[in-house]
Amino acid sequence: MFDTSSLSDTAPYALDRDQKSQIFSGAIGALTQHHYAACPQYKKILDKLGFDPAKSRALVDYPFLPVRLFKDNALKSIPDDAIIKTMTSSGTTGQNVSKIFLDRQNATLQTKVLIQIVSDFIGPKRLPMLIIDAKSTVTDRTSFSARGAGILGFSMFGRNVTYALKDDMSIDLEAIITFADKHQGETVLMFGFTYIVYQCLLLALKVEKQMLPFDDAILIHGGGWKKLADQAVGDKEFKNQLRNLAGVTQVHNYYGMVEQTGSIFMECEAGHLHSSIYSDIIIRGNDLRPLDMKQPGLVELVSLLPTSYPGHVLISEDIGEWLGEDDCACGRMGKYFKIHGRAKKAEVRGCSDTFTAN
């Protein structure tokens, strides 16, 4: 397998197209061979496709697995006694969920890469942190959901972590004001899932006729926009309300999925989602052929991180558009893109979609 530690001293957005392509095709080839040898179901799939993993080829020519496959199959490239964590995707009642099996090496790698990526946007220091969710979301360890995993993962970037919502998902103004008073004049970090931030924080502040007393807050959020779109709330309006009601001066959406935890795609200051040195995207048309820039299609996600399960090349159920490469106004190298939404007839899925307001 490719040794990702060789990239540990490289900034997460430092490699241009040529530098990155020299790494990726070989690294994905090595991961493909690893999973072919270690995961019997993956081997059957590649054999059925007539794909020889020993042959080197371009990145776009490696076979991809549909993310839905992980809902019905326990795909893993490690023995059962090596599993230390089982991640589950989000899903509404009655839906199957993906199960992702991690060993200690893979879980550690995901954490290290997540720290590298997020620190590029918020800096290396841990910030006072307000979680826009209820503490009970992470205290119930019987189900390690994508939402709970997201909260725990991003909590690494905070100190004095405080939860803004009560267990019934109502706003806890007393806890928020106490947190704000304690950290007056400091930059604070907020984290939450998009719809929960809107429904349980912003709308609640309007009802209570309250404004949060923050002068400099950063929000990282993710988990899908479908419910906000249904309420005619777009990105611009969402950010305006965050600034006016909550004092949030910097907003970073992120795109990712539990099937490739760690190699998330963060939104930069110019409003674009970015691939890092650990990840790449390919946009494919209805015939599944790769598309050029500025042509919407299905998003294929490529990651160097999955070693304990064959999730290194996946085709999502999302429609996206590749906007450019190595020339974003923010100065970061790599591809940048946007997500338009779910493909027609795809299951509704997003971390915040698992919460239903009363």
Image (spheres, grey):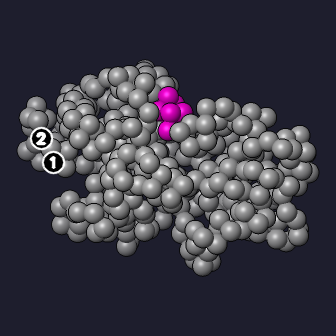
Mark 1, residues whose alpha carbon is within 10 Å: few (<14), some, or many (≥20)?
few
Residue at 34 percent across and 50 percent down: it is 326
Q: Amino acid at mark 1?
A: Asp
Whole-Å distance between the Cαs marked 1 and 2? 6 Å
Residue 199 seen by the camera: no
Image x and y of residue 167, in percent: 79, 51
Residue at 23 percent across and 63 percent down: it is 292
Residue at 28 percent across and 38 percent down: it is 20
The answer to whether 64 is drawn above or below residue 15 in the figure is below
Q: Nearer the viewer, residue 339 or 144?
A: 339
* Magenta-colored span: 111-117
Q: Is residue 287 magenta?
A: no
Q: Quadrant of the N terminus?
A: top left
Relative horizontal placement of residue 259, taking residue 159 as reference (left or right)? left
Q: Amino acid at mark 2?
A: Arg
Q: Nearer the viewer, residue 241 or 141?
A: 241
Q: Which residue is mark 2?
A: 57
Are the two marked residues, 1 and 2, in contact with CB atoms closer than 8 angstroms?
yes
Q: Quadrant of residue 211?
A: bottom right
